[in-house]
Image (cartoon, helix red, strand yellow):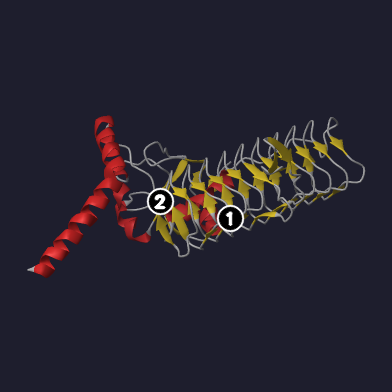
Amino acid sequence: MQYKLGQLAEKLDVELSGEADYSVSRIATLASAGPDSITFMVDSRYRKYLADCQAGAVILPPAEREHCPGNALLSENPYLTYARLTALFAPGVHKDEVAVHQSAVVHHTVTLGENVRIAANVVIGRDCVIGDNVSIGPGSVIGDNSVIGDNSVIHGNVSIYHECKIGAHAVIHSGAVIGSDGFGFANEQGKWVKIYQLGRVIIGDDVEIGANTSIDRGAIEDTVIEDGVKLDNQIQIAHNVRVGKHTAMAGCVGVAGSADIGEHCAIGGGVGILGHLKVADGVTVTAMSLVPGSIKEGGVYSSGTPLEPKVQWQKNYIRFKQLDDMARRIKKLEKALSEKTKEG
């Protein structure tokens, strides 16, 4: 795949400073780029690499142009421009496959859009609707009455249960499970009785779901993932959760049932969010934190104990167990001091 710099500047809507006819064929880092490569520099911290950079072109802020000896694409947001550039160099998905592979099992009631690609060993249940330009990778299973929107990509070995709705331009990576039963049981004299999950999973447009992520169907109402949400690998979204528009979650996040996560939130890796709470719009939760209650205002939140040498951690742990006793003693001393002051 090869592009002239003039073409790239036009496609990326940025200014070119250099040779419009110069061609590049791959993306590389500042350190490893060669004459056939295009790379990017986000800010001045990486300026020291420019002098020796062998790249055919560098995406960088206009203020850094004077430090770049070669061709440059000038962007106020180089990282965003780089993100858009990757779409131009990304390989196509399932382009070499026939429309419907002979080993696929597609129920005769399924509605297929135009330019659909269905790979080997795919199973699609009754009354499903598959939109235009959808690609479904090998071994994936789509349950009855499910809908997949236009231009979506379902990678191999994805399981989408019955009556789920996936929006347009979705990307669902291998091993993801959409619409499995939520964790619902009633206790009968020490034994667990299953509560069948009767809701659905509704996923909006432009949502990406990482490998081995699970999204449970609602118990009665639906589990809802709104437009633009980005979920990393190995995330657990429990039943009846709502995740607001353009929220992003890093790997191994766990969200318990009926939690309501706001829009434009950023949830760090390994965060645990308890159920039946609400997280406001614009909240960032740092990695490995626990969210035990509702967050009512946007901002950055953290919890947990940072890593430290074992000996120091053990000392601090002992002090932690002594806090309640220390607090009581301090309160008693303050009271005694107050009474003595009054007497004086």
**Circle 2: is it few (<14), some (14-19), or many (20+) Cα within 10 Å?**
many
Query: In the displayed image of the protein, which residue is found farthest to the right?
Result: 108
- Dot 1: few (<14), some (14–19), or many (≥20) neighbours within 10 Å? some
CB under 8 Å between callouts 1 and 2? no
Residue 71 at x, y percent in the picture: 40, 51
Q: Quadrant of the N terminus?
A: top right
x and y, in percent, of residue 217 in the image: 71, 48
Where does residue 245 sit, x and y in percent of width and height? 59, 60
Give the camera-side residue of 276 and 227. Answer: 276
Q: Quadrant of the C terminus?
A: bottom left
> Considering only order in the chain, which callout, 2 or 1, is on the residue closer to the N terminus?
2
Q: Amino acid at mark 2?
A: Asn
Disc 1 to disc 2, how far (Cα)? 54 Å
Amino acid of disc 1: His
The answer to whether residue 168 of the structure is visible from this angle is no
From the viewer's perspective, is 254 left or right of 308? Answer: right
Query: Considering depth in this image, is 172 or 27 the residue closer to the camera?
Result: 172
Q: For the point 45% across and 65% down, which residue is it?
A: 297
Mark 1 lies on residue? 276
Residue 61 numbered tag: none
Up/down of 176 relative to 133, above or below: above
Q: Secondary structure at mark 1?
A: loop
Helix, strand or loop for disc 2: strand
Residue name at image x 30 percent, y 42 percent: 320
Residue sticking out furthest to the left: 344
Of circles 1 and 2, the one toward us is 1
Q: Nearer the viewer, residue 328 or 32?
A: 328
Q: Where 315 falls versus 204 (above or below)?
A: above
Disc 2: which residue: 71
**Residue closest to the eye, 49 or 238:** 238
Residue 75: image location, x then y, percent: 43, 59
